[in-house]
Image (cartoon, grey):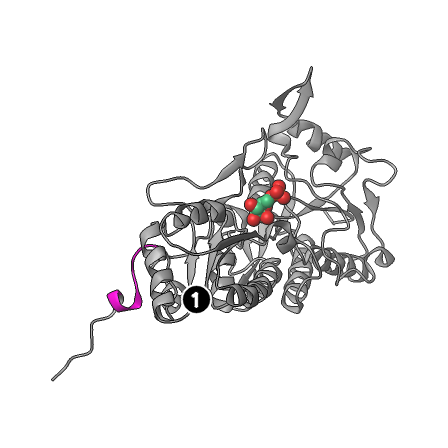
Amino acid sequence: MSIQRVGIMTGGGDCPGLNAVIRAFVNVGKRTYGWEILGIEDAFNGLIDTDYKFPRGNRWLELEDVRGIIELGGTILGTSNRSDPFNYVVKENGVERTVDVSDVVMENYARLGLDALVSIGGDGSMSIAKKFIDKGMRVVGVPKTIDNDLGGTDQTFGFDTALNVATEAIDRIRDTAESHDRVMLVEVMGRDAGWIALHAGIAGGADAILIPEIPYALEPIAQMIEMRRARGTTYSIIVVAEGARPRGGESSVVEKKLGAMPRLMGAAGRVATGLETMVDADMRVTVLGHIQRGGAPTAFDRVLGTRFGEMAAELVAAEKFGCMASLRAGRIEAVPIEEAIARPKRVDPTGQLVTTARAVGVRFGDGVTRHSLVAPPKTE
Ligand code: F6P
């Protein structure tokens, strides 16, 4: 069956680079293949109710619709992280419950005459895509998320921008930390993965980095602050991933909504509250939050988004459904969506990046220092 009409949607939390993917896909889809391309509004909301947000909602995308959008943050199609058709939240008499509206989506997909769907999203969107593939929908995936926690790809777009935003914030915080002799805690996003914290912490020269993959104790961090002060360095920078958790404890969940992932916040505040009882230092907490998700994508994310968008079009044209575009050792390849969702990508606590960070003096709150990693030099 030749492809004539393709839908494209962005799902989950937005991230810089989504528009680069849409732009590339529409350019290749139109210029090379002459497809009709339907932009679907707010992830599956636009396929659950095809009149959703009418008259703005779903719309046919032409080349002029994607002109001048590569540098824009957000997504021209809108997104949602609460529109899983298999667990769709409805409110009746003020009470929320979830229902399965996946058959409605299948009917609308057929009624709109779509031959394929491109789903740009993270692990949640890819898991939904897999369920629709099993129902007979022809789906191609594109991996996005600032968290960089999706399997099957070396990197997702959006991560590089978020990490650069966080690094710049740490640089700024260092200036004021030094002026005021303070301990500054910077909370970054990343959900259950410490990629943003680890990369931004290293790039920003943090003294300690707390990540979900290495549960922390407060004592080694307090000791590190005291040691720095004893050596005359009166400020410290601690980068805390929002999913960081104390040894034997849980991450800081502030809200659990039906049909949504638990909301994480307060990890850095919790560390500061604990440290305040152990160290006589002025402390301040900065939560970077959604600042990391907005703004113009970096050149890297624009290029990666463009490469993924082109690959998505080629996968649709070759009818390689059930596949996701992926970055592997610098090349764009196709991987089965199952592979992407089989195992989330986490920081390896014994991996090269953590080891490098330790080697330059970064603490992870587990009491391991560079000196406890290497044997002392032999004295003959
Ligand atoms: O997955 C991306 C992400 O930004 C996470 O880092 C963060 O925990 C979450 O989304 C925030 O989601 P929301 O926009 O729903 O607050």
Q: Is residue 64 among the parts visible in the rendering?
A: yes
Name the dominant secondary structure of the magenta segment.
Answer: loop
Q: Is residue 227 left or right of residue 292?
A: left
Q: Is residue 58 left or right of residue 105?
A: right
Q: Residue at x 40, y 46 (%)?
A: 274
Q: Residue at x 58, y 34 (%)?
A: 260
What stretch of residues is rendered in magenta? 365-372
Q: Is residue 191 left or right of residue 29?
A: left
Q: Is residue 371 magenta?
A: yes
**Amino acid under disc 1:** Thr
Image quadrant containing the C terminus: bottom left
Q: Residue at x 43, y 48 (%)?
A: 271
Q: Position of residue 214 (x, y in %)?
A: 37, 52
Q: Position of residue 374 (x, y in %)?
A: 24, 70
Q: Residues within 10 Å of mark 1 (few under 14, many from 20)?
A: some
Q: Position of residue 219 (x, y in %)?
A: 32, 52
